[in-house]
Amino acid sequence: MASGGIYLVLLLFLFLQHSSLLMSKGEEDPIPSDWPHQFHSVLFINRSGSLQKTDLWYDWPNGRNFNIIQHQLGVLKYDLEWDNGTSFYYTLHPFNKTCKIIHFDVGILRPNWLHGANYLGQHYVDNFLCNVWEKADFLTYYEHVLTRRPVMWIFHSSGMTAHVMTFEVGAVLEDENWQAPAYCFGENETLNQRSRPLLDPQVDVHHGFHGMLMRELPHSAYAK
């Protein structure tokens, strides 16, 4: 009887272990949420000790994206991006009135630009339990497990870290704020670029416009 009981316990153990392996194999890795079609987010960004606050306005239905960048104790800068590939980088009063126009062969990021990212597991960051992905070997993206909202992302090349402070789904900036100033349409230098440096603070256009967050993504990540 004793040996029979041990045999049954052993069979039960092997069955449970096998079932657990089957379940783990059947589970698929989570995928990052698409960006909402319209949102406003406040980001605090640290790049090797250089700090900035960025107001990010994403408006996919209207084909536009806006980064308003306040450098610590520095100039307030504007990065206005349109789906036709045109970007305006400018400053407003009381700072010197400056503007640069750059034409890219891609539009703004698609809402599903994170598709295809490599899942790395779960980690705590900024006191939130997050799912973590790596995109194209240059960015690590953290998304809150419960709310599925972004918490942080890190750029490998620069070490820049963006912390998401607020994330307002459905928030839309009034249309009048999307108009570049009149002096952008004078005799300003216009550049043509093959890739859009959206969201990457490494990019230095017009003597220090570092407000953008992402660069060198595959063209499929952008609108065309």
Image (cartoon, grey):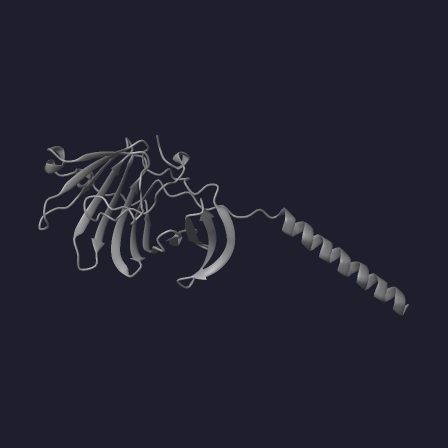
**Quadrant of the frame with the C terminus:** top left
Left or right: where 183 falls relative to 46: left
Classify residue 80 as left or right of residue 25.
Answer: left
Q: Which x, y percent locates residue 210?
A: 25, 49
Furthest residue to the right? Answer: 1
Residue that appears at 15% across and 46% down: 91
Q: Where residue 3 appears, x then y in whole percent?
A: 89, 67
- 151 vs 49, nearest the viewer: 49
In the picture provided, is 18 more to the left or to the right than 220?
Answer: right
Q: Does 70 appear above or below 97?
A: below
In the displayed structure, 200 sits above or below 45; it is above
Q: Nearer the viewer, residue 37 or 157?
A: 157
Which image quadrant: the N terminus? bottom right
Residue 139 pos. (x, y %): 41, 49
Residue at left offset 83%, top offset 61%: 8
The image quadrant that residue 65 belongs to is top left
